[in-house]
Image: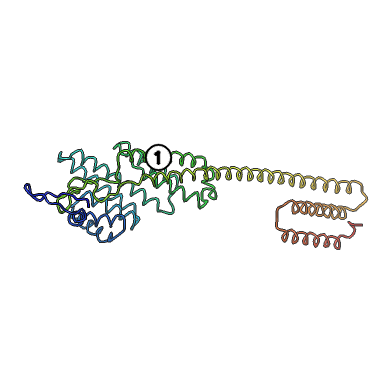
């Protein structure tokens, strides 16, 4: 059985079972681990840290726990915004002491990035969150990562997951606003996937943990120092498998872009056909007006009919030609058969009315 050694006194060394060390000296971190990853007792622990923060007793682990709580339970990114403001003040106070080691400086930047990543995750849960907002938030996180030189994969993972949901619920295809910008979405997905893979390599080579606490927060009640505290190491194998899944999504997105483009081309052709039909009916209307005018003029100038009879004949002919034009319009429209039959019936009724009212026209 593997043994660890615990120094009780400068002159006394005891062999201790590994499990005993964990149970005796890491109870607090075990509880925080359960709170963070298994959602055990997180509400009570979060309330305790909220109480401490109200009394201006800030700790790096308190910022981590509360940001995780706001992200997963209240899902309120504005609360995390307030937490970030408090953290910035906390950092200024700590830096003024001039007692920060390189370990602590790195820890503060890790916690800062963790807060911004939590804020980003909480915003993604908003059903009204848009791809345009995603691009702005990702750009902001990129600037922070560039400034502190820590390349966490998590924001790119969450962004790719967000796009994945959009792909599989077809909102990119259905929403016309997305359809217009689908080429930009493909480029965004490609860029996010590249950043995700680069960050995985960076994290893997450095055995990166999601967050690092200040030295004072890494010491257990039993006096043991735990550099990784209650963070868990990355599962690089799983992250690489997710990368392959996201690559598959990019192929689906590419096919959807073809569908959207083909759909846009068909709609464009339909619009052109409608425009041609409209112009055709306009020409038919002009033709009817000219024929009616010529027919009436010839009758008037010939002197064979009285002007009232000429007027009746001209109006009747114009009405018949109009009905003929309407009949053509009905035939060319993509209406339901039921509606076409109704219009044809009306056409026949109107024609019969003219037949009985003005029989002399048809003789």
Q: In this image, 336 relative to 67: left or right?
A: right
Of residues 98 and 110, the one nearer the viewer is 110
Which residue occupies the foreground of this view, 329 or 93? 93
Q: Secondary structure at mark 1?
A: helix
Total count of labels: 1
Which residue is found at the position 72% from the left and 60% from the top?
339
Question: Which residue is disc 1 drawn over?
Answer: 197
Quadrant showing the C terminus: bottom right
Residue at the far front in the pictured view? 1
Residue 350 spot, x, y in % from top left: 80, 60
> How far across and how far down the image is residue 181, in percent?
51, 42
Residue shown at 77%/46% (left/top)? 284
In the rendered image of this protein, does residue 64 appear above or below residue 208?
A: below
Kindly indicate the quadrant of the structure image that contains residue 237: top left
Residue 245, horizontal then vertical, whole percent? 46, 46
Colour mode of the rendering: rainbow
Q: Is residue 107 left or right of residue 128?
A: left
Task: Check disc 1: other Cα within 10 Å, few if <14, some if 14-19, many if 20+.
Answer: some
């Amino acid at each position: 059985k593997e043994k660890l050694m615990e120094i009780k006194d400068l002159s006394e060394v005891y062999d201790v079972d590994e499990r005993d060390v964990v149970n005796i000296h890491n109870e607090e971190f075990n509880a925080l681990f359960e709170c963070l990853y298994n959602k055990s007792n997180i509400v009570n622990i979060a309330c305790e840290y909220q109480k401490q923060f109200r009394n201006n007793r800030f700790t790096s682990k308190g910022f981590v726990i509360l940001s995780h709580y706001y992200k997963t339970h209240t899902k309120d990114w504005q609360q995390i915004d307030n937490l970030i403001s408090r953290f910035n003040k906390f950092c200024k106070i700590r830096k003024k002491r001039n007692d920060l080691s390189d370990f602590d400086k790195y820890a503060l930047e890790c916690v800062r990035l963790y807060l911004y990543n939590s804020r980003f995750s909480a915003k993604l849960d908003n059903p009204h969150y848009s791809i345009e907002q995603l691009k702005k938030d990702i750009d902001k996180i990129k600037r922070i990562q560039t400034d502190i030189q820590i390349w966490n994969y998590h924001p790119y993972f969450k962004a790719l997951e967000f796009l994945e949901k959009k792909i599989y619920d077809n909102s990119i295809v259905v929403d016309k606003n997305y359809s217009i910008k689908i080429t930009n979405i493909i480029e965004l997905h490609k860029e996010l996937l590249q950043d995700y893979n680069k960050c995985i390599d960076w994290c893997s080579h450095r055995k990166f943990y999601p967050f690092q606490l200040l030295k004072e927060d890494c010491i257990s009640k039993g006096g043991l120092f735990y550099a990784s505290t209650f963070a868990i190491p990355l599962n690089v194998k799983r992250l690489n498998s997710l990368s392959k899944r996201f690559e598959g999504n990019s192929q689906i997105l590419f096919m959807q872009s073809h569908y959207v483009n083909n759909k846009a081309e068909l709609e464009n052709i339909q619009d052109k056909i409608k425009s041609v039909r409209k112009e055709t009916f306009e020409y038919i209307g002009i033709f009817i007006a000219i024929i009616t005018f010529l027919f009436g003029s010839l009758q008037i100038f010939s002197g064979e009919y009285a002007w009232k009879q000429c007027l009746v004949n001209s109006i009747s002919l114009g009405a018949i030609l109009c009905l003929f034009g309407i009949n053509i319009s009905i035939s060319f429209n993509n209406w339901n058969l039921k509606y076409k039959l109704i219009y044809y019936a009306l056409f026949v009724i109107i024609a019969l009315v003219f037949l009985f009212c003005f029989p002399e026209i048809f003789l």
